[in-house]
Amino acid sequence: MKRLKNIMNQYHRFSMNKLLGLSGLWLLVFVALPVCLQAQNKKPLTIGIVTDGKWAGSERFVQALQNETQALLKNEYEVSFAKQYILHSQWTAKSIKKNIAQLMQNRAVEAIVGVGPVTSQLLANQGSYPKPTIATTVINPELQKLPLTKQNTSGVKNFTYLVSPYAPKRDLEVFHQLYPFKKVGILLYDEILKAMPFVKTYFEQKTQQMGVQFELIPTNTSARQALANIGKDIDAVYLGAIFRMSPNETQQLIQGINERKLPSFALLGTPDVQRGAMAGIAPPSNPKRISRRVALNIQRSVSGENPANFSVNLPFKERLVINMATVRAIDYYPTWSQLSEAELINEDKQNIGRKVNLKQVADEAIKANLELKVAQQNVASGFTNIRNAQSNLRPRVEVSASGRMIDKDRAASSFGNQPEYATIGSVSFTQVLLSPKAQGNVNVQRQLQQGREHQRQQTRLDVVLQATQSYLNILRAKTLENIQKDNLRLTRRNLELARTRKAVGYSGPSDLYRWESQIALTKKDLIDTQAQLKLAAINLNQLLNRPINEEFVAEEINLKNSSLIVANPQIFHYIDNPKKYQILGDFLVEEGIRNLPEIKQLDAAIAAQKSLRLLTRRQNYTPTIALQAGADYLFYRGGEGVGAPSIVIPSAAGNVNLSDNFSSPDKLNWQVGVKASLPIINGGQRRAELQKTNIEILKMEAQKQDLILKLKQRIMASLALTRAAYSSIQLTQAAEKAASKNFDLVQDAYSKGVVSIIQLIDAQNAAIKSEQFASNAVYEFIIQLLALERAKGSYYFLASADQQSDYFNRLETYFKGN
């Protein structure tokens, strides 16, 4: 039975597999058959293209046209852009006419597209068209004498054209607003001037209206030749149709113009501005828009519509773009208003030699900050106070000389002791043997000096915090500036969407006004952010004692690769649960009490007051004892009173001269002695001083306790803020991603007329705010981390490797003990 059951199971599986295989085959047939039938029903469609000549722009356009056309017609036609029907001419009217005739006569080609101003002109001159023909580059239908109906169509069977969105007249107006030139040189490739003589009239009309002069400058493939053709009287250059030049030559041409300090404006707009032209107003999306419009015209033509009825107008999207690197190179700056209206590229200088990072800013602040230098000089001045106090305990020697004259009668009656004229030299010596006041003053000054050193350390910690916070504020302001620029671009994009919605009837003009208002507000926010960036840079230069306007590049911070403590994964082991978090807070408080210079400064002041108290007490019973010595030498004496007076007394034995009994003193006098003094009564002065000292000690001890309490509060608050800031990094990044996705969805829905402008503005504001929060989160975390390290009195990122290792050893030991 078991064997029979196995056989039946195998048969069942075989039958099911066979059934499933047959079902899959039928499913494949039913799915693939319509596709195959549809492919067999596709009609072949060959399109020919003629260009003025082969250059990078024409090749990109041809590729874009192929992509757009095949995307539109792939379900109905087998579209072919065969290489033999893509004819790049040789930049001459003769070769262009030959290529046009070739495609017109070739029956395999069912539609013709002309690319370039000369090709478009020559196609328009054909008169009759056996197949749909589209000229893509018409400058001015009136001057070119092209057919144009009141409905803005050609009215000619099988022929249509596009008025180019590249508008030289409008370019010259904007260029003249940016730079009021007197004579502009207009560069065009040479064949345009030959095949299209109306071009001169076109520019004459415009420049006469503007009140300026112009000169048409023919170009070919050589940048050097074009530069040589620019005369010295030309003060501005308009880069027109210079299509013959390779990208390399165009770059060299623009570089040469910039070297001559000539402002330039580019017909092609953004691409040439990116190469170095000063400005342009044509956005890079124009070639894509033209190719899409041509593809739509081809679709309509092969569907049976007559190109004679197609609109020849193509709405032009203006966007002023200014290359700030070129502006700096030629040293001509547009106005603030013009800069605020434009999209700026190369806004940040690339050749700034000074680059700084977080640690460099801290190190430079320690070396150069003026406030810290003042604190250092205060310490140096304090050393002189110590030496001054010590001088009272060291020997003193004084030398003096004097000359004197007294009246004659007094000199005469001095018995030779006081001559009328005398010159005396003196020397004195004093050595304090015992002085509690002098010795106590030395101790006090040493303790006050310790306070000055701790005050210098306090200033050092504050300066490092100020400098690093200014540095982080620069990074924050720069990020916000980029966000506001993106916001402005988004708002301009939404304005374009609003115009499209209005054109198709999804909304009225109110949306346009709302977006224009939003653009103005966004510009204001951008200007405010740029002002904050400038102020932050000025503040950092001031802190680093640098020239206020000196430029520098602030390097971005990567938390993982920085010298901050969070780059060490060990730290996260100590904050992964509430208990460890509390222990870490207690450890940081102990570190702060041990390291904080404010506490050490108070300790030194308390020690100084205690020394003063001891000094005051000792003065009651300890005398001041000093050794004193001196000598006088009489260098000269004269006049009356020199020598003993002559006194003669008559006697029986004869006259007696009493002066013989007097002797004159010698010229040297000296003395040596010891002096001891002890004040007995001083009116209660010492008692008052002692009371004052005791009060000061009590006050400072209370200040210390208050400082320690505030330290605990400051550290715990900073730790809480640091933890919150670190957690917010991931949360704000998640919010940013969600808000960005929401904005993309709402913007797409707005473009389709599904949601209102209010919903889009709300979504955009949410996206911008989320991006701001996400960008600020990292900087806010670092700011809070540095504030925490300042609170505990030391910066981890400034410590040596050994000091950092010791820090973690102390931390580990503290955790084990708690």
Image (cartoon, rainbow, N blue to C red):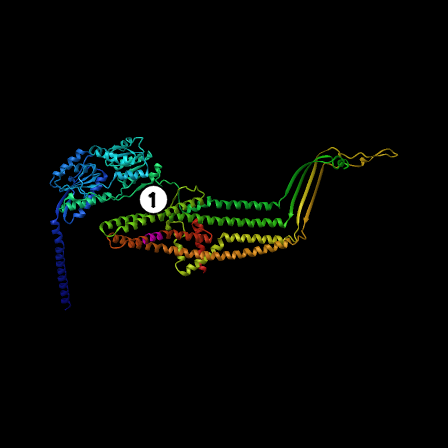
Our reading of the magenta stretch's main secondary structure is helix
| Residue at the right extreme, as displayed | 652
Residue at position x 30%, y 42% from top?
321
Q: Percent from the top left, x then y, of residue 359?
A: 42, 47
Determine whether the residue tagged by mark 1 lies in a helix, strand or loop.
Answer: helix
Answer with left or right where residue 114 lies relative to residue 560: left
Q: Quadrant of the C terminus?
A: bottom left
Which of the 4 quarters of the picture holds residue 587? bottom left
Answer with left or right where residue 751 lies relative to residue 721: left
Answer with left or right where residue 172 lies relative to residue 400: left
Residue at position x 48%, y 48% from top?
459
Between 335 and 30, the one nearer to me in the picture: 335
User: Which residue is labeled 1 in the image?
Assistant: 340
Q: Which residues are magenta?
A: 766-774
Q: Is residue 808 visible?
A: yes
Answer with left or right where residue 749 lies relative to residue 451: left
